[in-house]
Amino acid sequence: MTYNDSFIRACRKQDVDRLPVWYMRQAGRYDPDYRKIKENYSLLEICLQPELAAEVTMMPVRKLGVDAAILYSDIMNPVASIGIDFDIVKNIGPVIANPIRSAADIERLRPIQVEQDLSHILETIQILDKELEVPLITFAGAPFTIASYLIEGRPSKNYIRTKTMMYSEPELWHALMRKLGDMVATYLRAHVQYGGKAFQLFDSWVGALSPRDFKTYVLPTIQYIFEQLQDLDVPKIYFPGVSSGELLPELRQLPVDVIGVDWRVSLTEARKRLDYKYAVQGNLDPYLLTGPSSLIHEQAKLIIDEGLQDPGYIFNLGHGLFPEASIDKLKELTDYVHEYSAKVLRQRITSK
């Protein structure tokens, strides 16, 4: 078996022949075959069937030619093991039956039991470890993003309850952060032990905070999670979600390999704000995929040229794929990134 390790090499700022590509939410509803599967199974039902979850994970690798797979799962899966009753409701998202509102609610959260309660996810990882010819990225939701669902009870646009707890009951907030931090670290460690080759911590909504509040209420737990996992010899990625450009300078001490960047800040500026310490990943606006191919190529070229200015770059979107995206345009984009970046890198070698 030929193993494509370009994603791992880019994460470690090593030389590559062409830029690696993968997409957040690359196994999803833009794919007609996936939509057919969803006619019969919910997201959570797919996750409970390792063979099916593995097949969905591999679909974009085969169809798009991407350089990494990301585990088909959901950031809410581990909270079931700590005592949270939830469902993923169509057109809404995670809905919590027993939201976190008090000290008693936090105290009843139990330690995660990954092998006991989430064995189906670990089995999926084992299957993929045997089948894939590209690295498998696993992932977890970061504590702020998870907490926003647990406290609000469902997705929120303003995070009123979340911020009220954070500002008015900081001891309660930090107690919840500690429990979620331990949950995430334990969950991700199990992923690597069962065959994950890299992992990403998604903090999709933390851009709702100011840099000062992020540093005070969230960053210590993010630091703790990655410090707990430092002994694992796999690339570690932190994605601080959308509208997070102002938070980047606060990340300079994180013991990670890669920082994900959304489309609101350029890769050049992101590297500067990160003090050039990390590989970077991103950052095409996913909704550009609604435009003509010429525009997609033009915007991708600008991002690739920026990404290639320094070692360590992975092409991705600035957030996840949306259901209306065209699978044909996505395949065309993947081919373009591979072909154009390979041409630029060859020219560099020739000109030396």
Image (cartoon, rainbow, N blue to C red):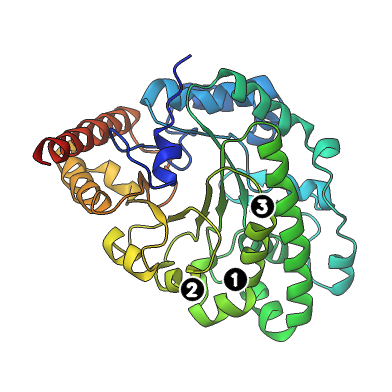
- The part of the image, by quadrant, that contains residue 168 is bottom right
Query: Can residue 172 be seen at all in this image of the molecule?
Result: yes
Q: Is residue 33 left or right of residue 172?
A: left
Q: Is residue 108 left or right of residue 240?
A: right
Q: Is residue 134 above or below residue 19?
A: above
Check disc 3 and report its element: helix, strand or loop.
loop
Residue farthest toward the bottom in the current orientation of the protein:
168
Q: Residues within 10 Å of mark 1 (few under 14, many from 20)?
A: some
Residue denoted by label 3: 229
Residue denoted by label 2: 250
In the rendered structure, which amino acid carries the disc numbered 3?
Answer: Leu
Residue farthest toward the left in the current orientation of the protein:
351
Residue denoted by label 1: 219
Taking the spot 19% from the left edge, 50% from the top edge, the residue there is 302
Taking the spot 56% from the left edge, 60% from the top edge, the residue there is 255
Check disc 2 and report its element: helix, strand or loop.
helix
Q: Is residue 166 left or right of residue 270?
A: right
Count of number-bearing discs? 3
Residue 235 on image: x %, y %: 53, 45
Of the residues under marks 2 and 1, which one precedes in the sequence?
1
